Image: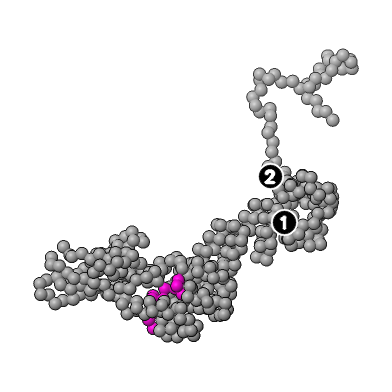
Amino acid sequence: MVLILGRRLNREDSGTRDSPAVKRKVFEVDSKTLTGNEVLDFSSGSSHSEAILQVFNEFRDSRLFTDVVISVQGREFPCHRAVLSACSSYFRAMFCNDHRESREMLVEINGILAEAMDSFLSYVYTGRAKITTENVQFLFETSSLFQISTLREACAKFLEDQLDPCNCLGIQRFADAHSLKQLASRCRSYALASFPDVAQHEEFLDLRRDELEEYICSDELAIGKEEVVFEAVMRWVYHSVEPRRPVLKELLHHVRLPLLHPNYFVQTVEGDQIIQTAPECYQLLHEARRYHVLGNEMMSPRTRPRRSTGFSEVIVVVGECYDPVTGEWKSLAKLPEFTKSEYAVCALRNDILVSGGRINGRDVWMYNSHIALLPCCIQYACFGIFCVFTLSFKSLL
């Protein structure tokens, strides 16, 4: 059919209607008078492509126009080569090059589950997929195999939303295995922030030694007290004593034993059966004992508090202290009886002792950090003893 636009003939023209010499003319418009409204650029939008996909999916269900059968675990999936190739570069390479599969009607694919293939094809033909905790791992692996990045990313996002103390370590291992750096980083941050809860679940007991060390050596480990770390390590060791006993020293090297409460250290740590039969750990125990006696005069990497405890090493100028972590100066209690005379100062067990201030004076003043409720760990550096953060005491002016 040809649609011809023209004008209605007048009566006087009717006489020539049947004349073979007269032809009907197509609607003519002077190009000089065009205003731009004579062209309609019509688009049905995404509804058109969705409708086409829906029809193709109906064709797939009824095996209409299908030209290949994908076999997975003995289950057959009739498909259209053109649809698979349009969605996946994996199938495009399979069907468009001179491979054996490009000529065969039945193509068998190994290494994936039939249920995952069913969900994958549903996404290919509809643009939608139902991701659940039961199928997310297999659907992720299937979309990775067939190089469907959008579905792969959706699975990764779903896993991130499911993070919990009972599964974050397993998800991190899965993310590391598939080079999902963002997901792996998110899992690690979550495990560090929820370590006391994470350490109570079965996944924690299945950690490799290097994975466990990565957590317990971190200053970002969120714990209220160091006893939590020690108990987590010993729980991991007792889960499989014989193969894990030889690495106890390396693990305790990352536990800040000097920061344990003295009573807990004597009763629980030194009283532990495995530790008592591990002479290689005695040096670490001796270090903790010295710290409990000498306080901050004895320093090591294990005497530095973790950030989550609220304590930090600070530089003290009597009356003020500077926290290198936050970059802030904080006011401390002022010394009484202000004079311009010299003082003698020293630190003992996180407290500051000050004497002098006047000739023949006998007063000794103590700055008690616990009573002052200042969350700081004062490092001793007087009398030429070197420490990581230099402690500087100055005479009051």
Residue sitting at x 74%, y 47%: 93
Mark sitting on residue 120: 1
- Front one among 215 and 125: 215
What colour-coding does the image apply? one colour
Quarter of the figure with residue 259: bottom left
Query: x, y (%) of residue 203?
Result: 58, 72
Up-down: is 255 above or below 26?
Answer: below
Quarter of the figure with residue 174: bottom right
| Mark 1: amino acid | Phe
- Which mark is nearer the camera, 1 or 2? 1
Up-down: is 155 above or below 308?
Answer: above
Q: Residues within 10 Å of mark 2 (few under 14, many from 20)?
A: few
| Image quarter (top left, top right, bottom left or bottom right) of the C terminus | bottom left
149 lies left or right of 356: right
Query: x, y (%) of residue 140?
Result: 66, 59
Q: Which range is magenta?
A: 252-264
